[in-house]
Image (cartoon, rainbow, N blue to C red):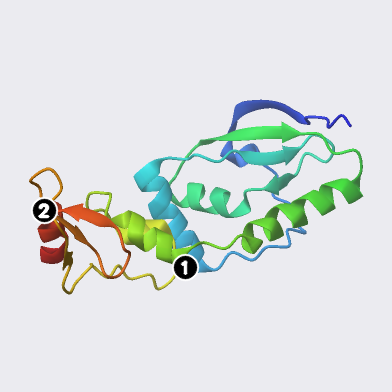
Amino acid sequence: MTIAIKIDKLVLVKINELKLNPNNLNDHPQEQIDILVRVIQANGFRHAIVVSTRSGLVVAGHGRIIAAKILKMTHLPVSHQEFDSPEEEFQWAVADNELQKQSILNLSKVHTELINYDAFDVELLAIPNFQFEPIIGDFVNEEPKDKMKFYTCPHCKKEFEEKQAKLRVEQ
């Protein structure tokens, strides 16, 4: 089975030349746009807007365009993509949005992974009502390995060298 790749090319387009789809099915609440603005400010613009070569309309990226306008951006990266029919364009736009919602973010893993990074604004994770809870409580002391003391976190079961464990508890 051969699957066609239907991406024309990635180009920078003036933001005021993009034609929003008047029948866009996604609503973008203000709180989503606000955090999107902050994420773009912190990390740059990393997702291209998808524009149909068939209709010339934006198929994906309406929220990013709104955020970019707030940030007074003048050009955005655009991926022009081919759709063979209005039905295919509609199906892809709906599926693109819905498939993203169906993935499940493992918040436990997010929480555990946060200990590997220096401090940053957790709001930029864009997880509603997420609160980082530093590892607290007693670490279980284990036998030293190669003259170093290691501790196991009772919450995540991850092993830490003594200095690292103390830093985690003090945070």
Which label belongs to residue 149?
Answer: 2
Local secondary structure at mark 1: helix
The amino acid at mark 1 is Glu
Name the residue at 49% across, 60% down. 33
Q: Earlier in the sequence, mark 1 or mark 2?
A: 1
Q: Is residue 133 above or below residue 71?
A: below
Local secondary structure at mark 2: loop
Q: Is residue 28 above or below residue 70?
A: below
Report the side of 124 relative to 96 (left or right): left
Report the side of 23 relative to 144 (left or right): right
- The spot of residue 53 in percent (x, y) is 80, 34
Count of numbered circles in the view: 2
- The spot of residue 6 in percent (x, y) is 78, 31
Residue under numbered circle 1: 31
* Mark 2 burial class by Cα count in 10 Å: few <14, some 14-19, many 20+: some
- Frontmost residue, 48 versus 144: 144
- Frontmost residue, 139 versus 131: 139
The amino acid at mark 2 is Lys
Which quadrant holds the C terminus?
A: bottom left
Which quadrant holds the N terminus?
A: top right
Q: Is residue 83 above or below residue 114?
A: above
